[in-house]
Image (spheres, helix red, strand yellow):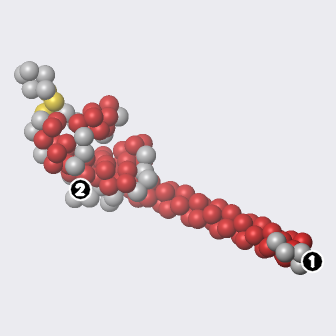
Amino acid sequence: MLIGELAERAGTSARALRYYETHGLLRAGRSANGYRVYDDAELRVVREIRALLAVGFGLDDIRPFVDCLRAGHPSGDVCPDSVAVLRRKIAEVDAGIERMREVRERLRGQLTIAIESRESTCSSRIC
């Protein structure tokens, strides 16, 4: 299929497909007139790429999933390298959640101090 058809079927743009191709994630053949021609299997690859991008993976993180699909597996997340990336991403998310909890606690403390300060300052006059 040509790039426009793949883009339409995958719900993305031809520009995005060319971008994935330049990063080695997508494979295109060439027709006699030089047009990119994609195998039907590339649709599955593009869908995997887009799904992983949607949850915050970078293109380098996506490579093991694409390689896993290309190795003939029904899913891109069953290979050891993909599992390693998933574990790393979960650890990153957990660390981010912990940082956000710490920020929330600091903000709560700051708010408590601000309210107490306001109440003591305003108790003798109307604020």
Residue with the most extreme right position: 124
Q: Residues within 10 Å of mark 2 (few under 14, many from 20)?
A: some
Q: Is residue 98 left or right of residue 119?
A: left
Q: Is 45 placed above or below 28 here? A: below
The residue sitting at 82% across, 71% down in the picture is 127
Which of pointers 1 and 2 lies earlier in the amino acid sequence? 2
Q: Residue 91 in the image: x percent, y percent?
A: 54, 61
Which residue is at a point 16% across and 36% down the rendered structure image?
3
The percent position of residue 86, horizontal first and vertical second, equals 44, 58
Give how far apart the Cα atoms at labels 1 and 2 are.
73 Å
Mark 1 crowdedness (10 Å alpha carbons): few <14, some 14-19, many ≥20 = few
- Name the amino acid type tagged 1: Ser
**Which of the image's four quarters has the N terminus?**
top left
What residue is shown at x 15% (from left), y 37% (from top)? 4
| Residue 39 visible in the displayed image | no
Q: Position of residue 33 (x, y in %)?
A: 8, 21
Q: Which residue is mark 2?
A: 73
The mark found on residue 124 in the picture is 1
